[in-house]
Image (cartoon, grey):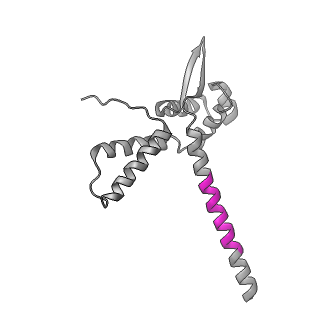
């Protein structure tokens, strides 16, 4: 049996994940519905496609506008094969799209909600760093008073 590929935006996936998580908690962590497991797999696949610094750099370059592979390569470095591989992963995840113009292939962002994911993660990193800074400052004050 051939599986159909479903394309969902990150925002929609996030909403569905929230609904599923609430349902899972509401039933006390009972067995997850197979359809929910399939959705969790799709969410994990899309998140995995973002789990590489080069792919994130490519996405943020494309946020400026359409670019050719050679232009992207000039910015992120590495080999053309490597950049093309990363672009393929991002394309398969639905985050970028491409168009051919003669011998050139131009890439652009297909789903700008990916940047909402990045912003949410950055916000979490900032919060954690601020909490750590505050804990260090507090510890230094305590040590300074006790020493």
Q: Position of residue 97 (x, y in %)?
A: 54, 25
Q: Where is residue 82 in the image (x, y as percent from the top left)?
A: 56, 33
Q: Residue furthest top?
A: 102
Pick the quarter of the image with the N terminus: top left
Considering depth in this image, is 132 or 89 the residue closer to the camera? 132
- The magenta region covers 123-137
Q: Residue furthest left?
A: 1
The residue lying at 56 percent from left, 18 percent from top is 99
* Left or right: where 26 falls relative to 94: left
Query: Could you say which quadrant of the image residue 45 lies in?
Result: top left
122 over 93 or under it: above or below: below
Count all numbered tags in the image, as a single digit.
0
Residue 129 is inside the magenta segment: yes
Residue in view at x 58 percent, y 43 percent: 116
**Residue 44, can we see it?**
no
Q: Main secondary structure of the magenta part?
A: helix
The answer, for residue 100, to whether it is visible in the render is yes
In the visual, does 87 lie left or right of 21?
right
Q: Which residue is rendered at x = 71% and y = 73% of the image?
A: 137
Q: Give percent across and percent down for residue 3.
A: 30, 31
- Vertical order, 98 against 29 (above or below): above
**Of 10 and 42, which appears nearest the observer?**
10
State the residue at coordinates (45%, 44%). 15
Of 3 and 8, nearer the camera is 8
Image quarter (top left, top right, bottom left or bottom right) of the C terminus = bottom right
Position of 143 relative to 87 (above/below)? below
Question: In the image, is residue 17 part of the stretch drawn in magenta?
Answer: no
The percent coordinates of residue 57 (x first, y second) are: 63, 39
């Amino acid at each position: 049996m051939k599986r159909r590929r479903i394309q969902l935006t990150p925002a929609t996936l996030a909403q569905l994940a929230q609904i599923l998580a609430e349902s899972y908690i509401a039933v006390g962590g009972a067995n997850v519905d197979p359809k929910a497991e399939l959705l969790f797999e799709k969410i994990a696949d899309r998140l995995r496609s973002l789990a590489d610094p080069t792919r994130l750099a490519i996405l943020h370059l494309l946020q400026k506008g359409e670019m050719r592979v050679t232009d992207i390569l000039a910015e992120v470095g590495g080999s053309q094969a490597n950049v093309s591989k990363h672009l393929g992963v991002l394309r398969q995840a639905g985050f970028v799209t491409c168009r051919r113009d003669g011998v050139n292939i131009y890439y652009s962002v297909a789903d700008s909600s990916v940047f909402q994911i990045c912003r949410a993660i950055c916000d979490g990193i900032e919060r954690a760093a601020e909490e750590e800074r505050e804990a260090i400052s507090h510890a230094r004050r305590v040590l300074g008073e006790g020493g």
